[in-house]
Each structure stands twice: as C-alpha cells, then as structure tokens.
Amino acid sequence: MKRILIVEDVEFNRDLFIQLLEDRYELLTASDGAAGMMVAERERPDLILMDLSLPVMDGWETIRRIKANAELQHIPVIAVSSYAMRGEADKAQQCGCDDYLTKPLDENLLFEKLGHLLAETPEK
C-alpha cells in the first residue's frame, strides 16, 4: 500500500484528507513544516501533500528542503493552498512541487493527480 504524508496544520482539512484517502493509502500526518520534514526523513513516504501556509516552517521552505535532500528529492510533492491567485501554481513548481491543488479540494482532481504521480491505474 502506498504511503502519503499529509502536512496540514488545520485539523478540519487534515481530517478531510484522511477521510478521502484512508481506504486507499497508508497515511502519515504532520501539523507543521518542521514536523513534516522529520516525518519525511524518517518514514520516506511515496508522496507528500503539503499545505503551503504552515506554522514553524512554512510549506515553501519545507518543500525546498525536501527537494534539496538527495534522499528525499525523488518523493513527489503536491502543494495544497487556499490561494488561487494567478502565478501561484508556477511559483510552487519553481519551488520544487510536482503538482498543485487549491482548496476547497476537488476530489476527482485529487485522485487524478495522486494516480498520475503514484503511477496507479484509475479505478473504473
């Protein structure tokens, strides 16, 4: 079973991810960027869902550190943000993200991106 690390400080949003994903994936969670970095280093998940607005260390810096770490840089990271401003997705890609999602989440788009990045066959 593929493992996904969810780095999200808002409990409601974290719980939503868990409800959506728990039947298909093994889930790991962290509520700030520094904790997310530690979990990624220790657990080596298959993919990371990273909120960008986080306490302690924001998602931007956490992603930069993950992608600068030779042992972690292969892990796909999907940035998740409530900001839908023009250029935000490009900025996330420049930071090292493999993809970008906005809140509120589109479930179908989430599963499409996960399937693509985890090289899964979509369910019919």
Image (tube, grey):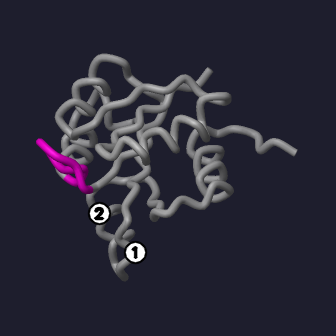
Q: Residue at x 59, y 53 (%)?
A: 110
Q: Which residue is mark 1?
A: 84
Figure check: 2 above or below 65: above
Q: How many marks?
A: 2
The image shows residue 64 at horizontal and vertical percentages of 21, 48
Image quadrant occupied by the C terminus: top right
Is 61 placed left or right of 79 in the picture? left
Q: Is residue 73 above or below residue 12?
A: above
Query: Which quadrant, please, contains the N terminus?
Result: top right
16 sits left or right of 38 in the view: right
Q: Residue lying furthest left in this view?
A: 56
Residue 75 part of the magenta segment = no
Label 1 element class: loop
Q: Residues within 10 Å of mark 1 (few under 14, many from 20)?
A: few
Say which residue appears at 33% left-offset and 51% top-offset: 51
Q: Which residue is mark 2?
A: 94
Residue 45 left/right relative to 7:
right
Q: Considering depth in this image, is 109 or 94 the residue closer to the camera?
A: 109
Mark 1 vs mark 2: in front: 1
- Per the rendered image, the range of residues in magenta is 53-60
User: Residue 31 location in percent, x, y?
Assistant: 28, 36
- State the separation of the CA atoms marked 1 and 2: 16 Å
Magenta segment includes 55: yes
